[in-house]
Image (cartoon, rainbow, N blue to C red):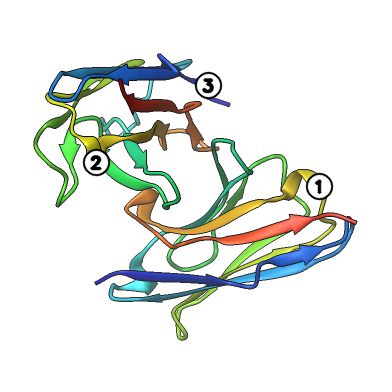
Amino acid sequence: EVQLVESGGGLVQPGGSLRLSCGASGFAFSSSWMSWLRQAPGKGLEWAAHVNPDGNEKYYVDSVRGRFTISRDNAKNSLNLQMDSLRAEDTAVYYCVKDGGRSWGQGTLVIVSS
Amino acid sequence: DVVMTQSPLSLPVTLGQPASISCRSSQSLVYSDGNTYLNWFQQRPGQSPRRLMYEVSNRDSGVPDRFSGSGSGTDFTLRISRVEAEDVGVYYCMQHTHWPHTFGQGTKVEIK
């Protein structure tokens, strides 16, 4: 069974940093495209960042490019999202997602507020 | 960015009746490999999204056969043949032909 478990969310001040992690199990992690998606409270879905199986191709939506960094550790079956220079508009539930949306984690809430 | 436009945004339905959601893209979703990367997701209240359909018309495992997808190019449809109570939630179309991958605004399905 595919399992994706996010952690690392919480309350952070504007301009601050946070690192999200996702532990993966039940599938060939090192062969899978992995992504971080987010959903602001009461809003729709946004694809934030995307990384290929080897970790050497990374894509970001314009609103996070230059502030967020996606990375993966295939030896540890983990996906990360380093979020810097956080803004109020980054407040959202962040989901770890496999293969174009095939499987989702339960999400971790990030609140950016003073 | 490719804009995905869903209609309607709210869909009250009667149990046992059919329902249909439209999704239109601002550009063709046909990729260079000939495939069309258009997916449909369901998000029940308080839950993570769940993929229902991939590449327009392929149902994910465990998805009831009352769900079907169709369309091509820029015009797509998700149909529910007979709505059940468990179908309540928000439905999103999403394209991953072009980066950034983009979602429609969501269609809220509720029971009349």
Q: Residue furthest bottom?
A: A75
Q: Earlier in the sequence, mark 2 or mark 3?
A: 3
The disc placed on residue B3 is 3
Q: Between marks 2 and 3, how big is the CA–CA gap? A: 29 Å
Q: Position of residue A22 (x, y in %)?
A: 51, 72
Q: Quadrant of residue A10?
A: bottom right
Mark 3: give few (<14), some (14-19) or many (20+) Cα within 10 Å.
some
The disc placed on residue B29 is none
* Residue occupying the point 69% across, 59% down: A110
Q: Which residue is mark 1?
A: A88
Judging from the image, mark 1 belongs to the subunit labelled A
Amino acid type of the residue tagged 3 in the rendering: Val
Name the quarter where the C terminus of chain B is drawn.
Answer: top left
Number of the front mark, 2 or 3: 2
Q: Quadrant of residue B20?
A: top left
Q: Between marks 1 and 3, how big is the CA–CA gap? A: 24 Å
